[in-house]
Image: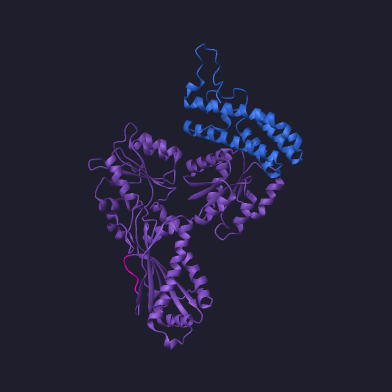
Chain colours: A blue, B purple
């Protein structure tokens, strides 16, 4: 199943994880995926800050894997790199990677959210403004 | 058949649940870490488990190790679902007896093939085969009623909710929508369903769940017999409780009072048993053991206490001592020769033992935040004790060196889903329970004289 907003930036590709689902299930799963991504992101940031080795490895690993499952190549690549740095206990460089990882994650989550909104028919959130210059979905949090 | 999915990612749990429900008609329970899994497995028997490796609190390997050391989960087949691709990590799991390994992200075709292979090899106990004929409702396996008539829905629910949960849909479309996110092993399809007819509902559900689903037509007087390719049978649309219950009985497992109690508090026999072995043992400075003796045990002194649990069950707990055991116990407690022990002291011993059991039961239910109300103890001095015939239950027999044998009985004298029952301590009675006597199945064997079973 594809939908509005699919793979807008080459990140999120619903055809990988959400095929063969009813629209209702796909919307629900999209919500769960976003929540899981955000949860692992928070765990990773906290674990790196407190140098919690196991948690950091697990969170980075999960982020990489979930991102790959929905086509999020940038997040997947950065999370994999972060995992390698934590495995090497290079906390300084892992911390340095955080900003890029968070930015990529934001993009990915926004794309999933936009796709979900499109599927839900919540066009009010994505409708172009009166001047017609809006490209759809921008400005949503 | 019930499966348990253990994964800290809700998205993975959701995908696996859809896979199992849509393709195998399984009931699926979920948990987020190993601790939760072990707690659930202690309460419920699962046919197999899908287990993630990377989880907080207790990871998959630790969980699997605990399972293999546990009596209840030792032999449960486990499929690992993980992102872990390293051969070394997977090899470490093999000694723990895993049935298969699924890589994340899940590929439906691979997952289907592996789960199908696992399910083909699962033993099907005789108990389950019998229960397939009559569906057993539970909190996570409710029945679905599809009917456009509000009065009938109300009547149906009032009758069936005594035996388990019922979910309603007022139209065919609403039913199909509900069935996308929930699995109902038993579906009753009535009339006035709107645009999507009863046959269409059955067709769609059959295509989604080729097996493990029972659909029953509720037919009005003037309706043609149902299409047996779509429906497993039909019941007459009756508002007469007795007629209705007789009609649903072939499809619905209606538990007896003790069975219903065991589903809510399976640990009750264990609580009474541990009170007997630990506290009585300390009181009499003797090692109390559970006895497998099944011979007749004439009872001289009894103490029974009534408990209402959660407003749903009237339970009569009893301690029954043969005269010789009561005299020996009273003699030990008073430090007096057996020939000097009066009957009142024997009765006091029975009463005291009864109070200990009741105290333990109350304490445990309090821990679980279940409300119980205790009735006044009833003491009897008689040559024999007969089990009341209005209920069913369990009788445990114990032996205590230096004192003798005694019995503890747990009799459920009344039960009803969600309504209140009356006890000696007072309370209310729902008129619905009055007609439930026929559903109370006596346990086998029933007599106290028959001893423990």
The percent position of residue A4, horizontal first and vertical second, equals: 53, 23
Residue at 47 percent of width and 24 percent of height: A122
Q: Residue furthest left?
A: B222
The one of B259 and B398 positioned closer to us in this rendering: B398
Which region of the structure is painted magenta? B386-390
The percent position of residue B430, horizontal first and vertical second, equals: 29, 55
Residue at 44 percent of width and 47 percent of height: B212
**Image: A131 above or below B326:** above
The percent position of residue B310, horizontal first and vertical second, equals: 39, 56
Residue at 55 percent of width and 15 percent of height: A134
Q: Quadrant of the C terminus of chain B?
A: bottom left
- What's the magenta bit mostly, secondary-structure-wise? loop
Residue at 71 percent of width and 38 percent of height: A83
**Image: B211 above or below B382:** above
**Image: B425 above or below B293:** above
Residue B267 is at least partly visible in this image: no
B288 magenta-colored: no
């Amino acid at each position: 199943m594809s939908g509005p907003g699919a793979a807008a930036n080459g990140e999120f590709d619903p055809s990988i994880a959400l095929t063969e689902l009813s629209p209702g299930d796909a919307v629900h799963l999209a919500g769960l995926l976003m929540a899981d991504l955000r949860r692992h992101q928070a765990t990773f940031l906290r674990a790196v800050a407190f140098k919690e080795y196991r948690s950091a490895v697990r969170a980075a690993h999960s982020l990489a894997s979930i991102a790959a499952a929905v086509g999020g190549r940038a997040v997947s690549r950065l999370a994999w790199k972060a995992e390698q740095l934590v495995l090497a206990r290079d906390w300084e460089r892992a911390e340095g990677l955080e900003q890029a990882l968070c930015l990529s994650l934001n993009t990915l989550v926004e794309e999933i959210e936009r796709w979900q909104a499109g599927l839900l028919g919540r066009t009010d959130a994505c409708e172009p403004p009166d001047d017609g210059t809006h490209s759809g979905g921008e400005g949503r949090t | 058949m019930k499966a348990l999915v253990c994964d800290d990612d809700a998205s993975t749990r959701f995908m696996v649940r859809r896979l199992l429900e849509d393709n195998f008609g399984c009931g699926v329970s979920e948990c987020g870490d190993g601790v939760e899994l072990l707690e659930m497995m202690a309460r419920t028997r699962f046919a197999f488990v899908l287990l993630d490796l990377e989880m907080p609190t207790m990871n998959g390997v630790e969980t699997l190790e605990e399972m293999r050391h546990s009596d209840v989960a030792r032999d449960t087949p486990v499929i690992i679902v993980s992102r872990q691709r390293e051969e070394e990590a997977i090899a470490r799991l093999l000694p723990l007896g895993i049935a298969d390994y699924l890589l994340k992200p899940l590929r439906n075709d691979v997952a289907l093939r592996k789960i199908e292979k696992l399910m083909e090899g699962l033993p099907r106990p005789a108990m389950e085969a019998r229960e397939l004929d009559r569906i057993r409702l539970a909190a996570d396996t409710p029945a679905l009623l599809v009917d456009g008539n509000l009065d009938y829905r109300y009547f149906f629910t009032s009758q069936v909710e005594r035996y388990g949960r019922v979910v309603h849909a007022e139209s065919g479309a609403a039913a199909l929508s509900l069935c996308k996110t929930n699995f109902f092993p038993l579906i009753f399809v009535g009339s006035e369903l709107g645009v999507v007819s009863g046959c269409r509902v059955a067709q769609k559900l059959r295509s989604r769940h080729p097996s493990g689903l029972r659909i029953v037509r509720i037919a009005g007087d003037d309706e043609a017999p149902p299409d047996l390719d779509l429906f497993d049978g039909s019941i007459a649309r009756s508002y007469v409780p007795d007629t209705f219950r007789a009609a649903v009985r072939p499809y619905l497992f209606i538990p007896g009072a003790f069975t219903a109690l065991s589903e809510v508090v399976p640990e009750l026999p264990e609580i009474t048993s541990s009170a007997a072995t630990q506290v009585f043992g300390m009181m009499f400075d003797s090692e109390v053991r559970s006895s497998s003796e099944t011979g007749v045990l004439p009872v001289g002194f009894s103490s029974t206490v009534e408990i209402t649990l959660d407003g749903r069950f009237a339970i009569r707990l009893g301690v029954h001592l043969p005269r010789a055991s009561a005299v020996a116990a009273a003699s030990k407690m008073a430090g007096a020769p057996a020939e000097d022990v009066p009957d009142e002291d024997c009765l006091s011993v029975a009463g005291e033992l009864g109070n200990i059991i009741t105290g333990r039961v109350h304490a445990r239910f309090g821990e679980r935040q279940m409300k119980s109300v205790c009735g006044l103890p009833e003491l009897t001095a008689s040559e024999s004790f007969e089990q009341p015939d209005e209920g069913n239950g369990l009788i445990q027999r114990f032996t205590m060196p230096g004192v003798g044998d005694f019995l503890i009985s747990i009799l459920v004298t009344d039960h009803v889903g969600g309504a209140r029952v009356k006890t000696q301590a007072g309370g209310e009675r729902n008129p619905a329970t009055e007609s439930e006597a026929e559903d109370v199945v006596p346990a086998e064997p029933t007599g106290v004289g028959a001893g423990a079973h």
